[in-house]
Image (spheres, rainbow, N blue to C red):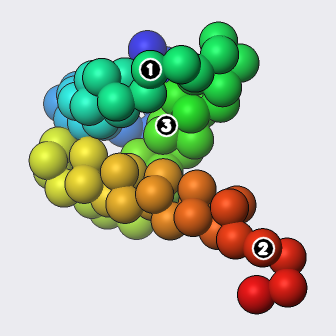
Amino acid sequence: MPFRDYRSYFQPEELEALTSAYGAAWQHLDASSVGLTSPQASELKRRLAQIILASACTGERETERLREIAMRGLAHRLVKELEPEDC
């Protein structure tokens, strides 16, 4: 569980929402990320958890909304990383 270190900051039902959002987002990503190396998958999971945690820290608790925010956040980060330096 990627959020176990944050048990003292969230209620059990809130942690369940974070974990469910993470699982749903990763399930979607895992199906479309064929060919990722183990380190790449680990980094993607880390980023996913970071985005969900950051959203929860601003007050978002709805599972589907957390998943959507995480997916958009990952897409935004990946696009930024792929942009040429001179843009």
- Alpha carbon distance from label 3 to label 1: 20 Å
Residue under circle 2? 84
- Alpha carbon distance from label 3 to label 2: 27 Å
Q: Amino acid at mark 2?
A: Pro
Disc 2 is placed on an element classified as: loop
Residue 34: numbered disc: 1
Q: Amino acid at mark 1?
A: Val
Circle 2: is it few (<14), some (14-19), or many (20+) Cα within 10 Å? Answer: few
Residue under circle 3? 49
Q: Nearer the viewer, mark 3 or mark 2?
A: 2
Circle 3: is it few (<14), some (14-19), or many (20+) Cα within 10 Å? Answer: many
Circle 1: is it few (<14), some (14-19), or many (20+) Cα within 10 Å? Answer: few
- Alpha carbon distance from label 1 to label 2: 25 Å
Locate residue 27: give its quadrant.
top left
Q: Is 73 on the left or on the right of 26, as rendered?
A: right
Q: How far across and how far down the image is residue 64, in percent?
A: 14, 47
Q: Is 32 on the left or on the right of 35, as rendered?
A: left
Residue 14 appearing in the image: no
Q: Is 87 on the left or on the right of 12, as rendered?
A: right
Which numbered disc flags the more N-terminal residue, 1 or 2? 1
Q: How far across and how far down the image is residue 40, in percent?
A: 66, 26
Image height check: is 71 above or below 9?
A: below
Image height check: is 50 above or below 7?
A: below
Which numbered disc flags the more N-terminal residue, 3 or 2? 3
Disc 1 is placed on an element classified as: loop
